[in-house]
Amino acid sequence: MSDVLPPADHLDEAVLAVPGVDTLYSAAPLIATVITSAVDALTRRPPSANSVLVARDKAGLSVAVKIGVTDGYAATDVCRRVHDAIMEHLRGRADQEIAEIAVTVARIG
């Protein structure tokens, strides 16, 4: 997936504002994260931010996010609220339909 929204879009902030979300993890595939981190370190660039990935294809926008869920919250409920927050945030900002929103829980507690 490639980012299609500008960094100023603040989609990560919308996800972090959801009750029960305490952390965002890189949503990029592991190999991409390792390669990007290595390149960033070698070139002395600041780390790349890939917390929420948004890609565009024929079907529309696809969004992927990995979250940490705070102890005491039901992960399924938090995932639904994250999904709804992303839909609300993108509604009116995107020029395409939203084809998919993938919310992955990477940690609970």
Image (cartoon, grey):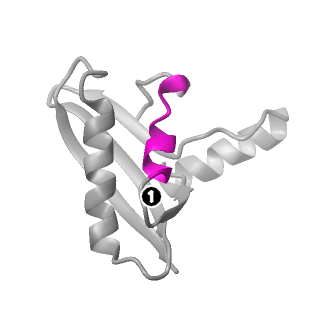
Position of residue 29 relative to residue 56, above or below, is below
Q: Main secondary structure of the magenta part?
A: helix
Task: Give SS at disc 1.
Answer: strand
Residue 60, percent from left and from top: 19, 29
Q: Does residue 14 show up magenta in the picture?
A: yes
Q: Quadrant of the N terminus?
A: top left
Residue 103, percent from left and from top: 33, 57
Is 27 in front, or is 74? 74
Residue at 64% of width from left, 46% of height from top?
Answer: 35
- Residue hosting label 1: 66
Range of residues picked out in magenta: 8-17
- Asked where in the image residue 62 lies, by quadrant, the reply is top left
Give the number of callouts: 1
Is 30 in front, or is 14? 14
Residue at 49% of width from left, 42% of height from top?
Answer: 12
Direction from residue 37 to residue 80 in the image, left or right: left
- Asked where in the image residue 53 lies, by quadrant, the reply is top left
Residue 47, percent from left and from top: 72, 41
